[in-house]
Amino acid sequence: MSKDKENSSSDIKQMSTLLLSGATMLADSCPDCKVPLFKKSEKIFCPKCGRKAVYVSSDDEAKQIEHAHSFSETREMVQDILTGKLNFMAQKLADCEKIEEMKNILQIIDMLIEISIKIASIQRNSWNKK
């Protein structure tokens, strides 16, 4: 069987499973991979590429959604970096034997935690607005 037929068969099986689980196949297709969109639990998505879909009524609304999505991705990336830096500094603290160096490391850890809390607060506030 060719690779295209295997992929097509796999897509059809996945869509069948979604239908059996109570999802609804919509008349609209994914703009990227042209597979029908599905709706389940008020979420609209493409079963093939996994992208979320949102219906908009204007270009301004589309730009707002795109901006919010970009901001969310950036926030997640910064949070991941902060977590990595916290782990790095925790290891440096564990290896440290000098009091002055410990103090500096703890100040950096404190700043990283403070920034993480601010990011979490921004995330909570954006969820509360929805």
Image (cartoon, helix red, strand yellow):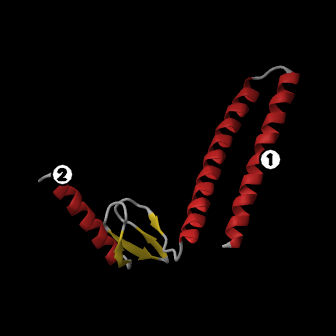
- Quadrant housing residue 104: top right
- Judging from the image, what secondary structure is the residue with disc 1 in? helix
Left or right, residue 102 beside residue 25: right
Name which residue lies at 32% across and 76% down.
19
The residue under label 2 is: 3
Amino acid carrying mark 1 in the image: Glu
Name which residue lies at 83% across and 23% down.
101
Q: Residue furthest left?
A: 1
Amino acid carrying mark 2 in the image: Lys
Left or right, residue 33 beside residue 43: left
Left or right, residue 66 beside residue 90: left
Q: Which of marks 2 and 1 is nearer the N terminus?
A: 2
Q: Quadrant of the C terminus?
A: bottom right
The residue under label 1 is: 114
Mark 2 crowdedness (10 Å alpha carbons): few <14, some 14-19, many ≥20: few
Q: In this view, does 30 lie above or below 7?
A: below
- Judging from the image, what secondary structure is the residue with disc 2 in? helix
